[in-house]
Image: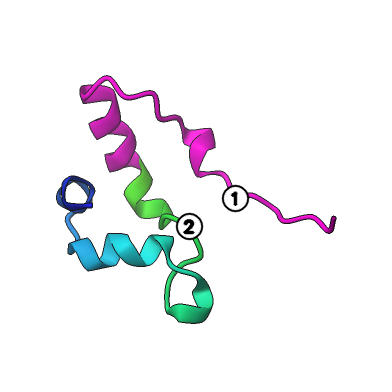
């Protein structure tokens, strides 16, 4: 979490909240859109295969 926090210029706790359910004060797995360009650039620099589509919302469907 610390490297991602450094790339996005936020505290590690903020990154942790991106993974937390909304009911517990998190974002429900959603990365705020204003951080995505910095994440994509850092991934490219590090040779990581992260794409804009990786940040697309996933809709839940009834089983």
Residue 34 location (% of width, % of height): 36, 53
- Earlier in the chain: of badge 2 and badge 1, it is 2
Pinpoint residue 5: horizontal percent, then vertical percent. Answer: 20, 53
Q: Which residues are magenta?
A: 37-63
Q: Residue 60: percent from the left, percent from the top?
A: 72, 56
Q: Residue furthest front?
A: 63
Locate the C terminus by quadrant.
bottom right
Q: Is residue 61 above or below residue 44?
A: below
Which residue is drawn at the image coordinates 39% and 23% (left, top)? 49
**On screen, 10 above or below 7?**
below
Which residue is painted at 46% across and 67% down in the image?
A: 27
Q: Which residue: 42% across, 60% down?
A: 19
The spot of residue 57 in percent (x, y) is 60, 50
Quarter where residue 17 is shown: bottom left
Q: CB of mark 2 within 8 Å of CB of mark 1?
A: yes
**Residue 26, located in which quarter of the rendered image?**
bottom left
Dot 1: few (<14), some (14–19), or many (≥20) neighbours within 10 Å?
few
Q: From the viewer's perspective, is 45 left or right of 37?
A: left
Q: Which residue is drawn at the image coordinates 50% and 70% (left, top)?
A: 21
Q: Which residue is mark 1?
A: 57
Q: Is residue 28 left or right of residue 2?
A: right
Camera-side residue: 62 or 4?
A: 62
Figure check: 45 above or below 59? above
**SS of the residue under disc 2:** loop
Query: How far apart are labels 2 and 1 at the CA level?
Result: 7 Å
- Binning the other alpha carbons within 10 Å of mark 2 as few (below 14), some (14 to 19) or many (20 upward) gives some
Considering the numbered disc 1 on the image, is that residue within a helix, a strand or a loop?
A: loop
Is residue 59 one of those drawn in magenta? yes
Q: Which mark is residue 23?
A: none
Most extreme residue toward the right is 63
- Mark 2, residue position: 30
């Amino acid at each position: 979490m610390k490297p991602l926090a450094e790339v996005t210029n936020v505290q590690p706790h903020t990154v942790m909240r991106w993974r937390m359910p909304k009911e517990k004060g998190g974002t429900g797995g959603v990365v705020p859109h204003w951080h995505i360009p910095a994440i994509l650039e850092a991934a490219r620099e590090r040779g990581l295969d992260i794409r804009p589509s990786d940040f697309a919302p996933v809709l839940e469907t009834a089983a």
